[in-house]
Amino acid sequence: MSLQVSDLRVYYRTLAGDVKALDGVTFSIADKEIMGLAGESGCGKSTLGNSLIRLDGRMKYVGGSVNLDGAEVPIWDDNDMVPFRFREVSVVPQYAMSAMNPTRKIGKMVSELTESRGLRFREIKEELDRRIDLVGLDRDVLKRYPIELSGGMKQRMVMVISTLLDPSLLIADEITSALDVSTQRAVAETLVSFRDHGFVKSMMVITHDISILYQIADSILIMYAGKLAEKAPTGTIIDKPRHPYTQMLVSSLPEVGVRYVNKKLAGIPGSPPSLLDPPTGCRFRARCPFAFSKCLEEPPFVEVDTDHSVACWKVSGPDA
Amino acid sequence: MLSLNKVSKTYKIGTFGGQDLIAVRDVSFDISPGEVVSLIGESGSGKTTVGKMVLKLISISSGSITLDGADVASIRGSAVKPYYRQVQGVFQDPFSSYNPIFKADRVFEMIRSEYFAGMARSEWSDKIDAVLRAVTLDPGQVLNKYPHQLSGGQLQRLLVARALLLDIKVLVADEIISMLDASTRIDVLNLLADLKSRGLGILFITHDLSLGNYISEKTVILRRGEVVEMGATEKVFGRPTHPYTRLLLSSVPQLHKKWATIEAELAAPIGGGKGCLFHDAYPLAGRNPQPGSDEPTLVKIEDDHYVGCFDLDSEKVARVA
Amino acid sequence: MRRYFGRKLFTYLLTFFVAATIDWLIPRFMPGDPVAVLVTKTGVFSPTQAAEMVKYYTNLFGLNQPLPVQYLNFWTSLLHGNLGLSVYGNGTPVFDMIMAAAPYTLALLVPAILLSWWAGNSFGALAARRKWLDNTVLPMGYILTATPYMWLALVLSFTLSFSLRIFPLSGGYGFNLEPTFTWLFFTDLVAHWILPFLSLFLVMFGGWAIGMRNMIIYELESDYSRYLASLGAPQGLIRKYAFRNAMLPQITGLALQLGVIVAGALVTEIVFSYPGLGHLVFAAINNEDYFLLQGIFLFIIIGVLLANFIVDIVYVLVDPRTRVAMRGGTA
Amino acid sequence: MTAIPGTSTDVTPAVDDAGKIPAPAAKRARGELLFFSLRSKKFVISMAVLLFLAFLAIFGPMVDSTDPLAQAGLPMRHPTLDAGNWFGTTYFGDDVFSQFVNGLRASFFVGFLGGGLGALIGMFVGFVAGYRGGWVDEILNMITNVFLVIPTLAVLLVITSYLKARGVMFEAIFIGITSWPWAARAIRAQTFSLRSRDFIDLAKLSGRSGWKVIVFEIAPNMSSYLFLTYILLFGGAILIAASLDFIGLGPTGGMSLGLMMYNSVTWAALQLGIWWWFVPPGVGIIALVGALYVMNVGLDEIFNPKLREM
């Protein structure tokens, strides 16, 4: 077990009160596993990603524990987290396009960064070059400034930097959403190759685009309104989802070949609940066609099949 | 009917208009009433530019756009109002489509003040109710709210409703669902398709082939400002011929087919040995018309299916069709 | 690159042209007849000087010539550095008077600008996001930038010179001294220089400190800072980067401030009756010496334009982005 | 609520998690602003100072009706609480307090008018240049740059020196005419970034004409920013006026804080140690301008959450 997260709670401080963006999630990622994390905007997926590496000013650790390769990860303490960052946990952020200092040559920045983490840049330079080749960049990008690179190039460069120290866990946050389909594919496949080359042990790919996950992820975790809905191997999530939300979500996605005239798809009526004071019980209740009295109680996230967990009374059975 | 005829857009770049930048080159297609035309391309393909030219938000450099035969470019000054009565648009970002400091239904008020100034309040609110019903919105839920109090889906529906206030013939929908959540986007897409029954012509601009394929009758694939392939949707997707079309198809993430599989399928001749005879000559990211070089003309390879590709001369095409 | 500076240079030349034209227009279109004023003043001149005076005057205002010609003459004499004779200086060429005064002003301005910029920026950066420093430095800074230069000068000279008698009250050097290259003269020069310098330095210092403090906070919020932080980079490195980037707008700020700063120097000199241009302006106004005034005006314009150009060059040197953009990188 | 920093269009990430603050955001917006206004020390303090000074400037001259330019007591009187002149008297025995309050009034006037005029010109140029773009922008830009690099005081120097009679009004107008460039530049940049927003296009699609778009769409969107600009111009105008007056180019007749300092210097207040002559005007200006600057930052923090210290 590479990563274990249990009952993690992280809230957002706002004037209106705490937004329970992450309200008790428990899951694990195995070695070599690429786990896709999907859900609608506001479901807490990015909060989950961020909280594993750095809580920003507005985020508040409330409870739960994170365990990486058997070691406790002190996500609540910014300073104690430092040794873990970059070496153990690393991130390719949403904002990869602007993640590099515009006024520093990329190479200089990387060297200053690594030196500041107590490494000799000379010693890792070779590996750095190798990886730059691997992602199909020219080695002299290191002598250039970020604005001299195209969007796709920046994206790839940041991926190389983030994984330079072979972290055990890599968090990739919406990294394909800004890109064109063709580049999208290249970037996604690069992620996989990083795993295959052993640059990263396991990976958490956060995106709103499930079809991307189908292409690259081993397992998919679906979040809804700050809680986990379903986790299963990719194939299962796409073909045999159990949670009503997952089912409706997957069936609402158009794909090449499906046409309005032949097969009219349908979305999910309604919208997610407010996370300021979320409803008790199942949070999908209001939008769920199968909702029944039991749903007023919170459904546990239980394993209903091997590697397949669901939080739904209909699936786990009212007596679960 | 709205028709584009060899429409081009060239930007003068550099402080004193040093060099030219060709954003759109010789694009021609029609939008008939009750028809959805999807304009598919990646960023920089000029798809949005085309949309904006139709909406007269950007001037045309050469070529012409006509609405029911009347030239659009020549419309000036106050004459644009009647035009906008017939041609409207909805844009990608629901949140930037609303002035954040005003209530969302102000978009209706603007229409009222510019087009229905005389109309009685009661009559107006009936009109509003009607259009809101048409886009399946509950007036109580959406009126009198600020943009950030509404969901992306609701905002986009409001904009469609806004367009319906006018008796429009053509609606330009530029990436209108790309920023919506998966669970709600399809409904907006369906709504758009339903508008066809009103005899509305829709220009559906998107980067997502599956969406274009889902909703449209006609597909135009744009690359670097040029049409590389166009025709009836089922033909373009059923028998993708241009290498670039194939590249797109092979990279669009699908739900039940892995990339590798799709690639294999595309590599194999489509439709029982037919299809692009020259695909072998190209790697999927194959050689494509470069701006500047002499352009391949669009060639008809079958009814309602045109391809712009160098080695696609008529004689070979004859063998295909 | 050439294009960029070409544009800048064009702007500056245009500016100078406009300024000079204003300078030429004013005496002609202002109410009240400067001629009369001058005539009354010509009393101070010896006949020959008066003649020359009148000659120059006809050259400049010469109503006997058509305006275009007058305008041309104005430029020719201007380009010959001929700014006319000073009434206040009893007929000394304006040009010479300016040249005599300019060194004092420059000796005040240049160090004051550079030092305050450096000190202010370092201080502001230090203060940002450090509560107690922020709460002490900031209010100080605001009070300083809001302070009229001459008032700080007044207070300083009243306390340190008049009351405590630490520094000489006024002048560029003691009345008893002759400008010589002696240690005595030099020290005396410095003693007279300190207070004017200080009043300029302090006011500017406040401005830079605040500017940098607010600027760097934006930078610390920026994406590249967040990225560094999430890769565990120490605060030191993050601040270093933020500082570098926050510096750039401060350079532009310097260019924008130049005009105001010069004004500050002028009024400061007046307080200390420091023998620089400010003092000259004051005298010129009180003696209605228009030639002198206009001469100084043109001199200041040229100075500020030059300074601006230097700042432009510096900016290009420190901001890689502009350089890249010029090389035509994919921005 | 302001459109100043980070006009990012990528809503999806932005909205994710943090964005979902459901409390009726309209109420939120206003309530939030008020909440932060009162919470912001900078704002509260500076506001208090400004109100106090405004009070002095308005009612001072009414309460103490002594003519600032008439002998109102023994010359060079130290500040005393008894018998009026609590700020003391000048070299001529004029009442410093009445000079002070009248000067203050003049400063407010100059700031209000000069700053206002500067803001108007700056807005006009900035909006037009930013919205129209193209060659209009090129030209306006050139003009702006020219005005930007000309040392305004020098210009004022030459021009005012030729005017025999000058009023506060003239001074204010002149400062207004010369102090707009940086504002124009800033507003242009903002307009430029707003121009590309979809709601601008939507307004056009509603048949709105160019100026309507500027007035009803762009300007309201930048209102907070425009206000901040005005505050800065207000303060700037007061300082410039002070310098002008001090050089001796201030209003002929009438009273201003700069003029007080000018007189104090010309009549050797330094040498005679009449500190109470030149201290009040300076303190007045510092308080006034300082309060404006602090308020500017306070408001900036209120409008722009990014700057709020957590």
Image (cartoon, coloured by chain):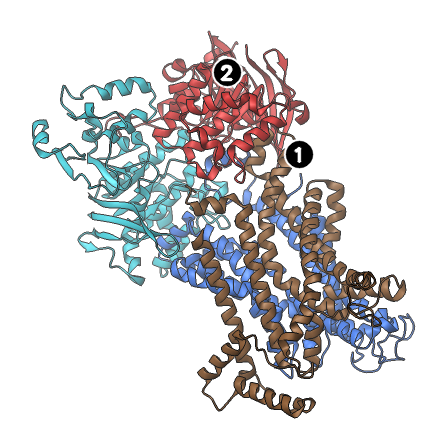
- Please tell me whether mark 1 sits on a helix, a strand or a loop: helix
Q: Is residue B316 above or below residue C282?
A: above
Residue C66, x across and y down, in percent? 45, 87
Picture coordinates of residue A182 (x, y %)?
34, 29
Is residue B266 visible in the rendered image? The answer is yes
- Are the residues under marks 2 and 1 on the same chain? no
**Left or right relative to B23: residue D240:** right
The colour of chain D is blue
| Front-lying residue, A230 or B69 | B69
Q: Is residue A260 above or below residue C85?
A: above
Count of marks overlaid on the render: 2
Residue at which label 1 appears: C236
Asked if one can make out residue C277 in the rendered structure from this viewpoint, the answer is no
Residue situated in front as seen by the camera: C248 or D55: C248
Name the image quarter holding the C terminus of chain C.
top left
Specify few, some or many for label 2: CA neighbours under 10 Å numbering under 14, 14-19, or 20 or more: many
Q: Which residue is mark 2?
A: A202
User: For residue A153, what is the image quadrant?
Assistant: top left
* Shade of chain C as shown in the rendered figure: brown
- Residue type at numbered disc 2: Ser
Q: Is residue C298 left or right of residue B78?
A: right
* Crowd band around label 1 with a 10 angstrom C-alpha radius: few (<14), some (14–19), many (20+): few
Name the residue nearer the viewer: A34 or A287: A34
- Give the CA distance from mark 2 to mark 1: 31 Å
What percent of the width, then of the height, locates residue A276?
58, 32
- Kind of residue at disc 1: Gly
Label 1 lies in what chain?
A: C
